[in-house]
Image (cartoon, helix red, strand yellow):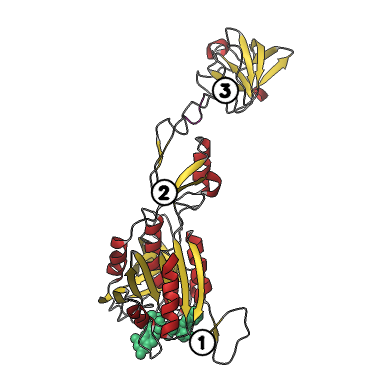
Amino acid sequence: MKRNVALEEAQDLLLRMACPVKECKIPLFDAAGRVLSREIKAPINLPPFDRSPLDGYAVRAEDIAAASEAYPTSLEVIEEVAAGYAARQRVTAKTAIKVMTGAPIPAGADVVIKHEDVTRTGNICKFFYPLKSGSNIVRTGEDVKKGELIAAPGTHVSPAMVGLIAALGFAEVSVYNKVKVAVISTGDELVDCSQPLQPGKIYNSNLPSLVAACLKLGAKITALGNVPDELDSIADIISLGLADADIVITTGGVSAGDYDVVPDALDRLGINVIYRGVNMKPGSPVLAAEYNNKFIVCLSGNPAAALVTFDLIAVPLIKKKMGLTSYLPTRLDAVFEGEFGKPSPQRRFLRGRLQVNEGANSVTLTGEQSNGVLKSLINCNAYIDVPAGSGRMNAGQDVSVLVVDDVFGH
Ligand SMILES: Nc1nc2c(c(=O)[nH]1)N[C@H]1C(S)=C(S)[C@@H](COP(=O)(O)OP(=O)(O)OC[C@H]3O[C@@H](n4cnc5c(N)ncnc54)[C@H](O)[C@@H]3O)O[C@H]1N2
Ligand code: MOO
């Protein structure tokens, strides 16, 4: 077992051992938020045929080459084509076919003129300007070319990706199974938020917040609830979690107190502790262990410490198990806007709000930074990485941040 490792080593030790869970095939309608386990190549062009982007008239460019306001060109409309149908006839010299938006371009035509720009009497249509061959035609494969790689394994399925996969005619997709995460909180002082609060007790916030964080990632959760600071109960519930889950997350009871019995419970279960303690604040007591290819991540109980170490250590692990190929938080440079008076003898992660700008990114603090303060995580989308040995931080200073909420995507 290692002790007091750097964050990067703490991440790496787990990521090296973790491989994605098994794959399955699911209906495309259920695929949003999942991770593709197979590449997707386009079996068809998109659009599959040349189509009209307008309601208008498909004609031959050469037929309207001389058209002008003063001397319009008259063509005979020989057919009308709605979206979803193909013209039966060809556009030949001096003829036009009326087409609706989305309709295939009739053979022979090489340009579409929008209907507002023509006048029509019976079957005769007048055109008042010429257009270059190819104008107002959406070409076959403009969006996607047949054979093109659409997504590699490990791609997160966004709503837009669902649309693209549907447009290519796939009703099912291969994805990784949902990662199963069991969440446990420990502490005699904790009361479920549905219960009245007794003296000396506090409401359990870690269990709901960690369950919510795992759900947001797309994991399959088992909330095993809260157990008292008691060796047998903690050992029993961890072993219950390990029976089904890929990853067990616990909070509380990992520090140095008399009732911090989580490490003893792991010991009793014969679980291999990979490391105990990470050089960071908050969350330094975090512990990670492995058992039969499953992982146990024990976060300290302070609510902010629990969520920060969850984001920086548990999330990359869950993401790698989910099959994602990008799992570490993005690191960006930013200018610090604000002040933080405390020195940081230990490496510190401050809760901040990153604004991504054209020139320089800027980051502000989201509020109080104590280990138990949860409120400042509400608008936090990045952690300011303050190196060990840093003094007071002032506005305008350059900092490095780890992005923990996706500020780029949609
Ligand atoms: N003598 C020492 N004492 C402490 C040390 C140390 O090195 N030496 N480390 C401190 C640090 S750092 C932290 S963080 C805490 C964490 O200890 P634990 O992980 O064992 O957590 P607990 O003692 O169980 O709880 C800490 C704190 O958080 C509250 N808590 C716990 N669980 C929840 C929950 N589910 N929802 C809301 N709040 C929770 C708990 O009541 C405590 O106030 O230890 C320091 N002590
Ligand atoms: O882990 Mo503790 O004080 O670093 O919150």
Q: Is residue 78 left or right of residue 210?
A: right
- Ligand 1 near label 2 (Cβ, under 8 Å)? no
Question: Of discs 2 and 3, which sits in the foreground?
Answer: 2
Q: Main secondary structure of the magenta part?
A: loop
Judging by the rendered image, the residue that carries numbered circle 1 is: 189
Q: Nearer the viewer, residue 393 or 402?
A: 402
* Residue 325 appears in the rendering: yes
Residue farthest top in this picture? 93
Which portion, as a residue range, is magenta?
45-49
Residue 361 picture location, percent across and down: 40, 61
Measure the alpha-carbon separation of dots 2 and 3.
33 Å
Q: Earlier in the sequence, mark 1 or mark 2?
A: 2
Give the answer, above or below, for where 407 lies relative to 9. above
Could you tell which of marks 2 and 3 lies nearer the N-terminus?
Answer: 3
Per the image, the residue denoted by label 3 is: 104
Q: Secondary structure at mark 1?
A: loop
**Residue count near mark 2 (Cα–Cα under 10 Å), binned few <14, some 14–19, many ≥20:** many
Tell me the amino acid under the disc marked 3.
Pro
Residue under the image location 45 percent in, 76 percent down: 237
Q: Quadrant of the N terminus?
A: bottom left
Tell me, yes or no, whether the highlighted magenta stretch contains residue 127.
no
The answer to whether 123 appears left or right of 258 in the picture is right
Please report contact status of discs 1 and 2: CB closer than 8 Å, yes or no: no
Asked if the beta carbon under badge 1 is closer than 8 A to the nearest atom of ligand 1, the reply is yes
Residue type at mark 2?
A: Thr
Q: Name the amino acid, label 1.
A: Glu
**Residue 225 location, x and y as percent?**
52, 75
- Residue 155 is tagged as 2
**Residue drawn at 74 percent across, 14 percent down:** 121
